[in-house]
Image (cartoon, rainbow, N blue to C red):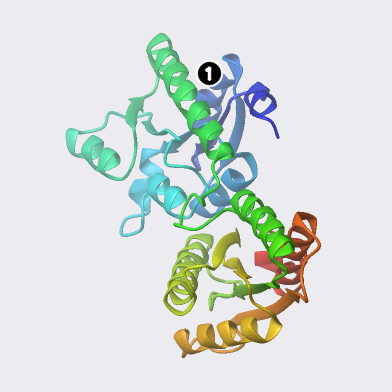
Amino acid sequence: MSNALADERPPSVLLVSDHDWLALALGAVASGWGYAVGRAASLEQALHVADATNPDVVFVDAWLEARLAGRQRVGRALREAGAITPATPVVAFSADPLSRDDRLAALAGGAWDVVELPVDAPLLRLRLDAWLAAKRYADRLERASLLDREAPVYNLRGLLSRARELGADAARGGTPLACVAIGTGTSAGPADDAATRRAEEADEAARLRGAWLASGRASDVIGRVGRTQFVVLAPRTGAAGARVLADRLAVALDGAGPERVRTSVMALEPTPAGPDDAIALVGRAVATLQRTAPPELAAR
């Protein structure tokens, strides 16, 4: 999607509240300003809706968060799960007066602002306009970035860019190019809530990334292609050498269990014909991960 087309979509707001009349009241205000309105009645629903819509603003019912005592604040949980970006404004709202301590707790939990209903509409709209401009600018930068939002590795765009470079170098130098696909699952079952699964996925992804950085080579190129899925390009390496690298990863991940870590090795030998061969190699690796991933991971 081009930057221009992405910015032409209507701005969107996600309302997280289990009180219908509160959400309807605030939603009516936002829709009147041209915002597409999404609804969620729980943190788990908010994770799924945010994944699907990339909201420009998230409004969270302050009293819903109060009932989640002892658990993460909704805004912070959405950010840590990667469902929204750090540039996405989160606003706590309430139909009842909030104490100073309530406001401080909301801000400490990741809210950018706290509003009480009925809202001061002109003031809120000016704030939304400013936040939306900043959010859209951050989105444009992210779409142009070659790095993953959550990890110091390449995203798919960056991985394909490096694959093109490595494919051209290998073709000129007459050297092979190998690829290792790495995926993992979590121990969270269907009964576990979405926040728990996301937390485990983040831990697994960090462990996989750290293990590869510890066991791989400086010349290897690693990219994240899914929540807990990575593809590594190994220049000047054939299938046998890539298998050695994968075995080193298994040693670094000792204790993970073979049912949770999946690796596959593929290589262009004797040499790739050019950049397109390397791009195709990455495509095969991503397809392999999608075929072998658990259904809940493959769908994301």
Q: Which residue is mark 1?
A: 29
Where residue 100 appears, as percent x and y from the top left, is 18, 33
Q: Secondary structure at mark 1?
A: helix
Q: Splitting the image into 4 quarters, where does residue 165 fall?
A: bottom right
Task: Name the residue located 79 percent from the left edge and 61 percent from the top edge.
Answer: 277
Which residue lies most toward the left here? 100
Task: Name the residue located 68 percent from the left edge and 73 percent from the top edge.
Answer: 178
Task: Name the residue located 42 percent from the left edge and 9 percent from the top edge.
Answer: 122
Disc 1 crowd rating (10 Å Cα; few below 14, some 14-19, many 20+) is some
Q: Quadrant of the C terminus?
A: bottom right
Where residue 296 appears, as percent x and y from the top left, is 67, 66
Where residue 65 appears, as percent x and y from the top left, is 37, 47
The foreground one among 272 and 31 is: 272
The foreground one among 17 and 188 is: 188
Asked whether residue 226 is in view, the answer is no
Which residue lies most toward the top here? 122
Q: How many marks?
A: 1
Asked whether residue 258 is in view, the answer is yes
Compared with 12, 34 (above or below) is above
The residue under label 1 is which amino acid type?
Answer: Val
The foreground one among 201 and 36 is: 201
Compared with 27, 101 (above or below) is below
Q: Is residue 207 left or right of residue 220?
A: left
Task: Name the residue located 48 percent from the left edge and 72 percent from the top edge.
Answer: 204
